[in-house]
Amino acid sequence: MLPSTLPSSTHTPLRGGATLRWGILAPGRIAHDWATTVHANTDQRVVAVASRSAERAAAFAATHGVERSYGQYEALVGDPEVDIVYIAAPHSEHRVLAELAIAAGKHVLIEKPMATNAEDAAAIVAAARAAGVFAMEAMWSRFLPQTTVLRRLLDDGVLGAPRQVSADFGSRFPFDPTSRAFDPALGGGSLLDLGVYSIWFCGLVLGLDPENVRTSGSLAVTGVDEQAVVTLDYAGATAVASSSMVAHTPIVAAIGGEKAVLSFDSPFCGVGGFSIRADEERLVWRDPAPLLWRDGLCYQAPAVAAHIAAGLTEAPEHPLDRSVEQLRVIDEARRQLGAA
């Protein structure tokens, strides 16, 4: 029997809490989306931006009302009025830029995935812990209201023991061998770009220490994985995480438990909702906030500010070791595919 009502979200309020002065390294598309929604929906302050191109940094600053722009990353991490650095560069640059900011004593929020492999992610984690600064992978979906409700449902056993979990993320990218998505030197491939969401979701439910990892898929002519299906075997449970850069997919996720099944709206990793079904009973949860799905990028920023204000150096919701574990799974999946 399902509960009469669903639990409330425990997400950090978007406004009214601790604030930080943010600097952005690499003003690309994800940085634009992040800055837009953070400015519109939170009290966080973006005060500086840096690019290897001073002109590009200045243009971003003008668009987003950012006070200072720099043509060198070193100048931003040396800015005493920046509390935390959001690293929005291609995956291949995450480690070097994170270590640069950490060495300057800055807290860091690093775009997902934390790095291109588990070894580099572990090095970032070690550097942050040694410096005593806050660090987190920007797995923004973990901080959405719907995810906090899901976590409570799992903890309360509403679904029963999870036995089957599935998540997919596919979006067709125009083929360009020089683009970030298809260039192995830039950390290209569907697993690092899209599959990280699917694997994160499976790990949220079942953990990321499977007994076995089995992968099928195909490679682009550049050698990166263009699509992948990763099956994670656990004792008494199975998860399937898929990703594709050559096909549009439903971008949905589901959990089959011994008591009930939970199905997320599309896209499962953005602002939305889910339904729970048990026999003839059905409950629906919808995010009441009037935000578009990608506006959910903003929820992680006030959560990070609250954790830093509380003296934490990592987020309990998405600890650093979880980011390394995700990449260990991705490393193995890419190895099985022979991806560059």
Image: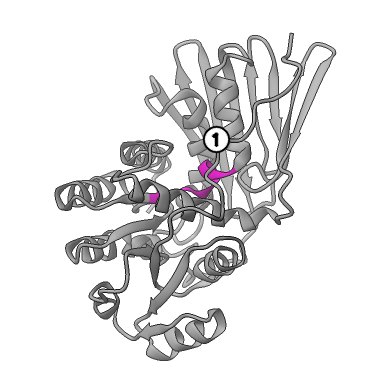
Residue that lies at the very extreme toward the left in this rendered image: 130
Is residue 277 in sight in this rendering? Answer: yes
Residue 51: % across, % down: 37, 80
Q: Is residue 336 above or below residue 91?
A: above
Q: Is residue 237 above or below residue 208?
A: above
At x 64% / y 31%, what residue is drawn?
8
Residue 147: % across, % down: 58, 36
Residue 340: % across, % down: 37, 54
At x 68% / y 46%, what residue is drawn?
267
Res 273 quadrant in image: top right
Based on the picture, tell me whether residue 148 belongs to the magenta stretch: no
At label 1, counting other C-alpha atoms closer than 10 Å, the crowd grade (few under 14, some 14-19, many 20 or more) is many
Res 21 quadrant in image: bottom left
Q: Quadrant of the N terminus?
A: top right
Q: Report whether 194 appears left or right of 97.
A: right
Residue kind at label 1, given as amino acid type: Ala
Based on the picture, tell me whether residue 139 belongs to the magenta stretch: yes
Magenta stretch, residue numbers: 137-144
Is residue 113 in sight in this rendering? Answer: no
On the image, numbered disc 1 is attached to which residue?
241
Residue that lies at the very extreme toward the bottom in this rendered image: 55
At x 37% / y 57%, what residue is drawn?
110
Image colouring = one colour
Res 46 quadrant in image: bottom left
- Using the image as rendered, state which of residue 286 and residue 88 is in the foreground: 286
Residue 203: % across, % down: 47, 31
At x 40% / y 41%, what residue is drawn?
330
- Using the image as rendered, state which of residue 15 and residue 209 is in the foreground: 15
